[in-house]
Image (cartoon, rainbow, N blue to C red):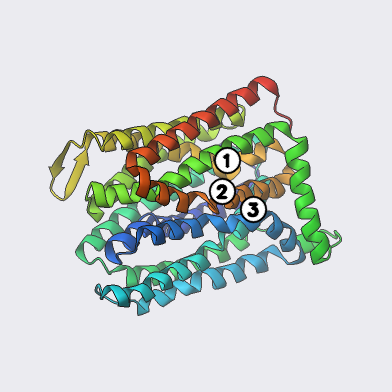
Amino acid sequence: MKIVGLKTNERKIFGLHILYSIIEGVLFGVMVLNEFVFVKSLKGTEMQLAILFQASVIVFVFTIVIHELLKRYKKKTILRMTALITRLPLLLMIFFPRELLSADDMIFYHYFFLVIFLFYFLAMPIVYPIINSILKNNYTNSHFGALYSYAAMTNKIVMMLTTFVFGWILDIDPFSFVYVYPAIGILGIISLFLLSFAVKVDYLQTGKKILSITESLRKSFRDMKTIIKSNKPYRDFELGFMLYGFSFMLTVAVITLFLVEKLNLNYTSIAFYKNSYNLIAILLLPFFGKLIDRIDPRKFAAFTFLTLLMHLFFMGLTEYYPYYFDIGAYRFYYLVVISFVWNGLFAATMSLLWNIGSAYFCKDGDAGTYQSVHLSMVGIRAMIAPLFGIWLYQYIGFSGVFALGVLLLTLSIIVMFWSLKRDKLVA
């Protein structure tokens, strides 16, 4: 993990970034099984499952507005308040039942679960642009991708271990989450407080004029329109991402149902598949972290979209070739194994592309704004895609949804190569 030529400040920020990534890895490791807890332990409905995923991404629709509104408060204060408001509700999980109640009684806990995680997900459109800005303004361009990949790799190692342990615990007691979620709520508060120490200059300390709320809102949409209109490579990047995003969001909840209802996998097997692709991602992140610094991000995006396409392709084939073998509590479907190998490539590349891809299209000072535009687009497609994916599944089945996902990804790849041929990167 040694990188030559790091400045003192880079080393300090990298240390905080690593520590933050370790703690968040524990949270992510638990959240990997979140949808499965909702379906298997709490017996939530298909549409409620879609709403749970939708809540995790629809919050991004307000990111570009939030980016402007955040300028009137110090980022340290914002991070600490966000930690308390979004992660304290996880402690309420301690009041959930320890066994499955009647269907009528469980309805209350289904919606209680959804509300708690809506609060949890509200942190993302606030925290992600701040992280992007902190890193872009403290890491040099030559080290940005590499340092981020090492932190992401560490995050995924911790996440993988946590997922394995949590899956094993859930197979012993499907309601053990009532103790685990409150514990990660406390850890989540600690992680954001740690991140706040990486803030070097707060917005209010720059001496810039703070606009009124109305002016801020107008400026937010004006900036968004200007960026999309003037920066053609970035606009194409976001168009490709929009097609990819619809594919991902249409299929993500359907994949959960496929693994649980069609393949009847237990928590231990699900945790294995999740860990297998994370292990691949861990091994490949350093390579892709260096690669994204050296090639056009649109070319990197095209490869990333291809990996998800192959993941969906082999997952869909499993419905027609459901061959497997068992080893103890683990069930291995041959094509699902291949599918998750591709998913490992996708996890390694998308963790970089989604978080820092937009920063390659702009100057350092604009990184937060560009990432805010990027995340707002995520929220826009989230208003439609997850629920539409479940609705499609109910009418055209698993294969139909997977086929549509493959088609959208094919189009996203075409857009990236068309953009590469037409315009050079300007940043």
Q: Nearer the viewer, residue 186 or 418?
A: 418
Q: Residues within 10 Å of mark 1 (few under 14, many from 20)?
A: many
Q: Quarter-wise, where is residue 250 in the image?
A: top left
Q: Quarter-wise, where is residue 298 in the image?
A: top right
Using the rendered image of the protein, determine whether residue 37 is visible from the camera's viewpoint.
yes
For label 2, the SS is helix
Residue 11: x and y in percent read 60, 48
Q: Amino acid at mark 2?
A: Arg
Q: Quarter-wise, where is residue 77 in the image?
A: bottom right
Residue 202: x and y in percent read 74, 61
For label 3, the SS is helix
As drawn, the residue found furthest toward the front would be 395
Mark 2 / mark 1, whichever is N-terminal: 1
The reply to whether dot 2 and dot 1 touch (C-beta < 8 Å) is yes
**Which residue is labeled 3 in the image?**
129
As drawn, the residue found furthest toward the top would be 421
Q: Amino acid at mark 1?
A: Met
**Which residue is labeled 1 in the image?**
242
Mark 1 / mark 3, whichever is N-terminal: 3
Using the rendered image of the protein, determine whether residue 365 is visible from the camera's viewpoint.
no
Q: Amino acid at mark 3?
A: Pro
Q: Which mark is residue 381?
A: 2
- Foreground mark, 1 or 3, reads 1
Mark 2 / mark 3, whichever is N-terminal: 3
Task: Locate residue 254 relative to residue 408 in the image: left or right.
Answer: left
Residue placed at 53% from the left, 35% from the top?
289
Q: Nearer the viewer, residue 417 or 134?
A: 417
Residue placed at 75% from the left, 61% from the top?
71
